[in-house]
């Protein structure tokens, strides 16, 4: 026997379980709405043409495969910070933002968790929204932070519980760390309005809390990378010193290349240098330095004006397809005579829609209609196409009336 004879079997990943069930189903028109990756209108994975072109450019440069520095490819991180904070950002212009490349968004969150665990002067706890991306809790508790929650989603309105959220922020102990989804909240697709963001910023400031932004979908929500960065930029303008996890998985379709960045806004270039030195000390024993290929692709897209423009058009294209599928799903449900209201489908934004369907209804959807998604009623709008939207609406209608 090995030393592992007593190791307990862990539970399977909820999403992978759906994929398994979907694969086993022989229905010719089965629909998988569990996947968290963009699909084109034929239901196929999509490599952005700008990514193809950037990859060609990188290849033609005949670069070596030497290690990057601990914080990654500098041309990439510089451009990533500019994309997030914007050209008018004072701390960016003044050299006050520490940034490191990361293993996509998850890696950025993990570096942030480790940094806060080691250096945050207040309580080592982080408040995440209810609900939140399923991995947040695991990432932060594995970083050694206590994970607490604040109110976010109102299941009666299938929208934002704004009063509950602000109330919870006001009731947190002074100086609490709060995780905010910058845009396209996962799993609900419910975002605060710009006015609500202003009030959230005020409440966070009043409590002297520390904002940690997770921006996994910049550009993917509205189609406009500036608009989607509103919350982050507003907080910075208001004098907060947030930290930020960025992912290029969705907005560049670079999922498996693992391209991301983690940054911290500081009060001076001198403070930035000290923060930077400690970020390096955290990263070095974790993975030494990040992979270069994906960062070179992203850097080429962000730094080449023509490719950048093309990419912004392609991001807009993905966002519009998602927005169109939301409208078609709602339209088809209404055409069928559904007695329920489906406004939330088009009010919500980003890759996911929270349908408001119960776990029981989601099981029926799978068993009786071969439509697969998570039991919380979340569907990936990216899995909807012009071809399957009618059948999807019919299936939902038959279950909800
Ligand atoms: N945060 C949120 C809210 C997400 O939805 C995701 C992707 N599903 C991530 C972070 C991180 O993804 P990745 O590590 O692939 O960039």
Image (spheres, grey):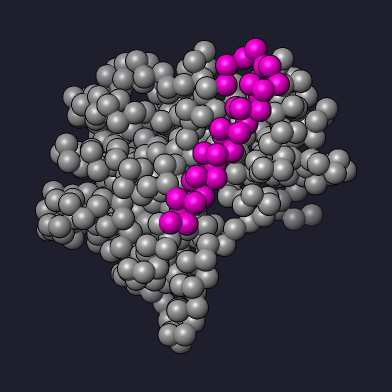
Left or right? Give the position of 372 relative to 75. Answer: right
Query: Which residues are drawn in magenta?
Result: 313-342
Is residue 69 in the magenta section? no
Residue sitting nearer the eye, 152 or 88: 88
Residue sitting at x 80%, y 35%: 370
Decide if residue 397 is in sight here: yes
Residue sitting nearer the eye, 342 or 155: 342
Q: Which quadrant is the C terminus positioned in?
A: top right
Residue 58, position as x, y percentages in the image: 45, 78
Q: Which quadrant is the N terminus positioned in?
A: bottom right
Q: Residue placed farthest to the front in the image?
A: 335
Residue sitting at x 44%, y 42%: 221
Left or right? Give the position of 353 relative to 95. Answer: right
Residue 8, position as x, y percentages in the image: 71, 41
Residue 385, position as x, y percentages in the image: 66, 43
Compared with 235, 271 (above or below) is below
Is residue 341 in the magenta section? yes
Residue sitting at x 51%, y 50%: 318
Decide if residue 136 is in sight here: no
Q: Quadrant of residue 383?
A: top right
Residue sitting nearer the eye, 320 or 70: 320
Left or right? Give the position of 110 relative to 329. Answer: left
Type of secondary structure dominating the magenta stretch: helix
Residue sitting at x 57%, y 62%: 47
């Amino acid at each position: 026997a090995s030393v592992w004879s007593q190791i307990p079997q862990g539970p399977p990943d909820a999403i992978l379980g759906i994929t398994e069930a979907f694969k086993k189903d022989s229905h010719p028109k089965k629909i998988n709405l569990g996947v968290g990756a963009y699909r084109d209108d034929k239901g196929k994975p999509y490599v952005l043409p700008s990514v193809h072109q950037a990859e060609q450019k990188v290849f033609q440069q005949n670069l070596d495969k030497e290690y990057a520095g601990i914080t990654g490819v500098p041309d990439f991180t510089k451009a990533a910070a500019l994309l997030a904070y914007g050209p008018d950002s004072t701390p960016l212009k003044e050299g006050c933002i520490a940034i490191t490349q990361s293993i996509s968004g998850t890696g950025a969150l993990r570096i942030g968790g480790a940094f806060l665990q080691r250096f945050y002067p207040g309580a080592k706890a982080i408040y995440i929204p209810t609900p939140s991306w399923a991995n947040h809790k695991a990432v932060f508790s594995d970083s050694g932070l206590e994970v607490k929650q604040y109110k976010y989603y109102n299941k009666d309105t299938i929208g934002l519980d704004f009063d509950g959220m602000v109330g919870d922020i006001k009731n947190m102990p002074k100086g609490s760390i709060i995780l905010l989804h910058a845009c396209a909240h996962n799993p609900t697709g419910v975002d605060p309005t710009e006015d609500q963001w202003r009030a959230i910023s005020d409440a966070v400031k009043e409590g002297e809390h520390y904002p940690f932004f997770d921006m996994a979908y910049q550009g993917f929500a509205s189609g406009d990378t500036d608009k989607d960065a509103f919350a982050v930029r507003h907080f910075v303008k208001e004098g907060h010193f947030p930290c930020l996890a960025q992912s290029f998985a969705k907005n560049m379709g670079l999922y498996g290349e693992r391209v991301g960045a983690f940054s911290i806004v500081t009060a001076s270039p001198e403070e930035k240098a000290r923060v930077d030195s400690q970020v390096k000390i955290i990263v070095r024993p974790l993975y030494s330095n990040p992979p270069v290929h994906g960062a070179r692709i992203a850097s080429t897209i962000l730094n080449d004006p023509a490719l950048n423009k093309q990419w912004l058009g392609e991001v807009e294209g993905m966002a519009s397809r998602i927005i169109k599928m939301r409208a078609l799903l709602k339209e088809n449900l209404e055409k069928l005579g559904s007695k329920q209201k489906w406004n939330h489908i088009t009010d919500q934004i980003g890759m996911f829609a929270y349908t408001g369907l119960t776990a029981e209804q989601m099981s029926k959807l799978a068993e009786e209609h071969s439509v697969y998604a998570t039991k919380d009623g979340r569907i990936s709008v990216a899995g909807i196409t012009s071809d399957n939207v009618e059948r999807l609406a019919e299936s939902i209608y038959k279950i909800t009336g």
